Amino acid sequence: MYGLWRPRVLGAWRVPAQGPVILAGNHAHNVDGPMLIGTCPRPLHFLVKKEAFVGPLDPFLRGIGQIEIDRSSADRTAIATALGVLERGGVLGIFPEGTRGAGGDFAQLRAGLAYFAVRSGAPIVPVAVLGSARKGRLVSALPPLRSRIDVVYGEPFEAGDGSGLRTRKALDAATAVIQKRLTAHMTEARQATGH
């Protein structure tokens, strides 16, 4: 990441140094995941669509601890693996929009993030990757080479009400809290970076 672009990381100290953490990032471009993996102060395990696990990427992604998920159904193996990361005190990365969003601005959240947060009790750290959606002149599928990409970590927060209940009502309430906090973080990150 540092060889191709000029990442500027702000607030990485907000990621708790130990214990389970969920990193919730926006997803505007394919480089967002690698950018977070490369700049996070702790080893990061992302839920990655199964379609990415092909050819030489398959052993590489598995070797760096990424978790394959089938997005066409409730992938119980991926869910159990992700919960295991949190149970062992690790960092789980999730793009809560489920796929690259039109603006990568947390406008459409899926309930998966709320489920992991409520089930594990792990705090959520919002993170905004800004500047990755611009198209380069040499390779239009990538941001301009050597351009600045900002990675802005926010304050950790709890999504659940502490009851541990995983009812539809509890998950809906947690999703509303998450959406509010992530949207506010995105606004603050844009103001802080000028993106």
Image: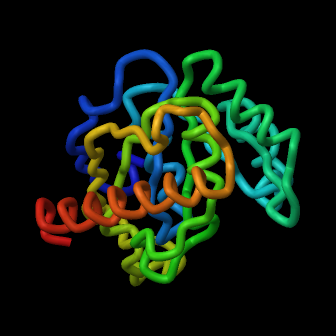
Image color mode? rainbow
At horizontal 50% and vertical 77% (from top left) the residue drawn is 139
**Picture quarter containing residue 79?**
top right
Q: Quadrant of the C terminus?
A: bottom left
**Picture quarter containing residue 125?**
top left
Figure disc tally: 0
At horizontal 70% and vertical 51% (from top left) the residue drawn is 48
**Picture quarter containing residue 168?**
bottom right
Image x and y of residue 43, in percent: 52, 27
Q: Is residue 176 above or below residue 12?
A: below
User: Position of 130 compared to 137: left or right?
Assistant: left
Of residue 96 and residue 162, the one placed in the foreground of this image is: 162
At horizontal 55% and vertical 43% (from top left) the residue drawn is 93
Image x and y of residue 63, in percent: 73, 30
Image x and y of residue 68, in percent: 79, 46
At horizontal 87% and vertical 39% (from top left) the residue drawn is 77
Of residue 190 and residue 54, the one placed in the foreground of this image is: 190
Image x and y of residue 163, in percent: 54, 33
Q: Is residue 160 above or below residue 49?
A: above
